[in-house]
Structures are given as structure tokens and as C-alpha cells.
Image: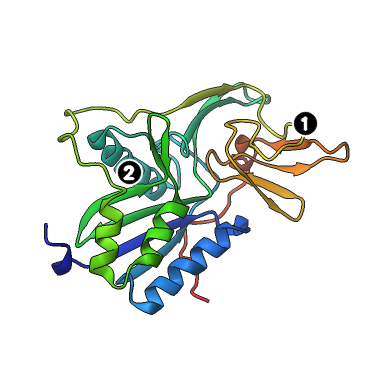
Amino acid sequence: MNARSQTLTVVCHVRAPLLLEPVDSQVESLRACEDEGTIDELLVRSWPKAVSRSEESPYQEVLETYERLQRWADRRGVSISPPFRTRTTTSQITDETETVLVTPLLCLEYYLGDELVGVYPHSSGEETITTEDVIARIRCADDPASAAEELAALTPEPDGPSPPGAKPTVATEDDATGGVETEARTRSATCPDCEGQLIDGQGLVACRECGWTGTIAENGGYGSTSPEASTDADPGPVRSVPPR
């Protein structure tokens, strides 16, 4: 593929209510890259924290996006779980079980023309390519062609098409509690769920890797809000984040 003849488009998925540092600064960096002509087009999309993986879910577009990204990961032998996670919850009221997809705070796709070429973050073995890695590469480029060359260094070659009927590989976690969990945790710079780096946004902390969120408790530990709690309320339709 001749990268110079292809339009370079970056799609940035974010949780709009959680545009905290450094997530917000990453979005602003991408907007600056578009303004400077380093990428041809930036599309910013928001999604809920967690969506039901049922056919009745009103967020089919989010589920379709996840399945597209998972197919890309399967072909290249890498993992996107985390940052995506699947959890099984049981309602304390109805005793019904539901499977939900937990979305990352920030996820990037990049396209050359109409072809999906890269998804970030993703991991292979012990190595993880983060969204910060991607944005740093783009910022070092002079134009879309050189940006595509920079990103090619972070993108594994496909191993071939996924087998027919192959199901996405996801990280599954059973959680029968539901609602809000208020377990005191020893405060540290790492996520209590996946040991990823935490973002501190004036009392609200979040993990960019697995999507765990919580607050700083009075005892200095963390009180976590389970992703399942957000599925009880409708976070609104998937929408574009207006340009600043």
C-alpha cells in the first residue's frame, strides 16, 4: 500500500464525562495534529462507560465498533482486553444475569483510506502500545505520509483473516455484587484492578488501561464505583464531541 496516496484518518473514542488530564490533553494534541496537517482528518466519538452485550442494547454501534476492533486484533495476534473488558453482573433485585462491555477511557483507530490499519492501546505479550505512544509518533511527523510511516512501526502485520465464525476473545470477570462498591484500598499510583497508571482528576481517579474509576476515600484509600452501576442509568446516545 502506498501511504502517500491514502488519506490518514484518526478516530478517537472517549468517555465524554471523564475528559480528565491526561485524556483531555491527548484529544487536544490530536486536534493540533489535524490543524497542523499532520493527519488528514480527526473524528472524535464518545461512548458510555459500559453497555449491555444483548441484542436489545440501544448501543449497537458501540458493540459493532468493539467487534471490528477485536477482528483487527485477532488477525494480528494482539490483545485489546484490556483496555476492553467484559463483566457478568447479577441484579440483586431480579436475580437476572447480564453481560456488559466496559469501554476504555480513550481508544484510537487509524485508517489509510477505508482500511483499518491500527488500534490502540493493544498489547502483545509483555509489551503494550499506548495511545501516548501513538500521539508522540504523530507529533514527530511532518505530514500524513510521514505520520503513516511512524505509525507503521507500531503496527503488527496481519497473520491472515480470522477463521469463519470466530468469536472475539475477551477478558471475563464475574461480579455478582452490582451497584456501588466501597472497599477501602491502599492508595498508590497504580490501578487496584489491573495495576495500570491512574489518572487523578481532582478527587476522581480513573485507569486508562481497564476503565476502573473511583474516588479518594477519607482514609487515603480508594472507593471504587463498579462499571455495572453505570448500566442502571441511561448515559444517553453515542454522540460526537463538539470541536473546541
Left or right for 177, reference 149: right
Amino acid type indicated by mark 2: Leu
Q: CA distance from mark 1 to mark 2?
A: 34 Å
Location of the N terminus (image quadrant)? bottom left
Q: Nearer the viewer, residue 28 or 173?
A: 28
Q: Is residue 121 visible?
A: yes
Bin the neighbour count of mark 1 within 10 Å (Cα to Cα): few under 14, some 14-19, many 20 and up.
few
Left or right for 173, reference 35: right
Residue 69 circle label: 2
- The image shows residue 89 at horizontal and vertical percentages of 57, 26
Q: Nearer the viewer, residue 235 or 121?
A: 121
- The image shows residue 25 at horizontal and vertical percentages of 56, 64
Please tell me whether mark 1 or mark 2 is closer to you in this view.
Answer: 1
N-terminal-most mark, 1 or 2: 2
| Vertical placement of residue 171 versus 153, above or below | above
Q: Nearer the viewer, residue 227 or 105?
A: 105
Residue 186 circle label: 1
Kind of element beneath mark 1: loop
Kind of element beneath mark 2: helix
Amino acid type indicated by mark 1: Thr
Q: Residue visible at 28% across and 50% down?
A: 153
- The image shows residue 165 at horizontal and vertical percentages of 21, 28
| Vertical placement of residue 87 versus 46, above or below | above
- The image shows residue 123 at horizontal and vertical percentages of 39, 36
* Quadrant in the rendering for residue 187: top right
